[in-house]
Image (cartoon, grey):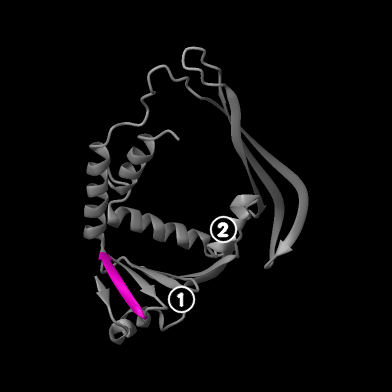
Amino acid sequence: RSFAVCTLLAATLAFASAPDVKYTQTSVTKFHGGMSMLMKMAGASGPQTSTIMISGNKQRSDTEKNSHIIDLDREVMITIDHKKKEYTEMTFAEFRAMMDKMKNAMAGMKPQTEEKPGAEKVEWKFDVKVDKTGERQTINGYACEKVIVTLKAVGEMKPNAATGEAGGQGGMMVTSTQWMTPKVDGWEESMVFMKKFAEKSGFMSEGGAGASMESMMGSNPQ
């Protein structure tokens, strides 16, 4: 459901007073080679910054393009489009119905785990390495340690003389650099809010959205 800007004020008044928790997070994803050029053309190569505020049973997340509000009391999720000056609402009940519809649609699809006749299976090997560098730095007043997490995924397919398929290897590597600290102000409040949201929206219930997403991902091991 979409609403024009004349009613936008009702959505913004929810955070007119100072929130209980407020923090800003910035994420940067870097690509290399041809993928880097594609992401730059799509305008997705720059840093993504969002500000999160929690006040009682409401949470608001603001980015340059839009804002997202979760209201646990009204059981509604609101998305504000700053460019169009419009907002849309989705109730928790509508969210559950949408996820149920997706789950039913996925249940009717043919599983993708079946191999083509005569085709060789690809064997995957995964390796995860966590490197505590010992490098320390104070960031926004918090004592942090630099940790580098490296994930390698290598797939190998053996040659198949019957089909003429050549064997080979392929894979990918993802490196994540993180500055870790034992405790951050507001983190506990954020976790409490998200637990309430999961319970009220039915996300983590049996057959809920969380289970639906797990089922959908499980239908395609890729």
Location of residue 24 in the rendering, given as x and y in whole percent from the top left corner: 56, 69
Give the prevailing secondary structure in the magenta stretch. Answer: strand
Q: Position of residue 155 (x, y in %)?
A: 56, 28
Q: Which residues are magenta?
A: 85-90
Judging depth in this view, the residue of 72 and 9 nearest the camera is 9
Quarter of the view holding residue 198: bottom left
Seen at 41% across and 83% down, the residue is: 16
User: Which residue is identified by label 2?
Assistant: 39
Quadrant of image for the N terminus: bottom left
Residue in the foreground of this view, choosing between 118 and 148: 118
Q: Residue at x 26, y 57 (%)?
A: 95
SS at circle 2: helix
**Which quadrant is the C terminus positioned in?**
top left
Residue 25 lies left or right of residue 77; in this view the side is: right
Compare marks 1 and 2 and give the one earlier in the sequence: 1
Residue plotted at (44% across, 20% down):
119
Gap in angstroms between the C-alphas marked 1 and 2:
35 Å
In this picture, is 160 found above or below 131? above
Q: Nearer the viewer, residue 35 or 6?
A: 35
Q: What residue type is disc 1 on?
A: Pro
In the image, residue 18 lies at what x, y percent?
Answer: 46, 80
Residue 143's image quarter? bottom right
Residue with the most extreme front position: 164
Answer whether residue 131 is visible to the viewer in this image.
yes
Kind of residue sitting beneath label 2: Met
The answer to whether residue 29 shows anywhere in this view is: no
Labelled disc at residue 19: 1
- Circle 1 sits in a helix, a strand or a loop, which is it? loop
Tally of numbered discs: 2
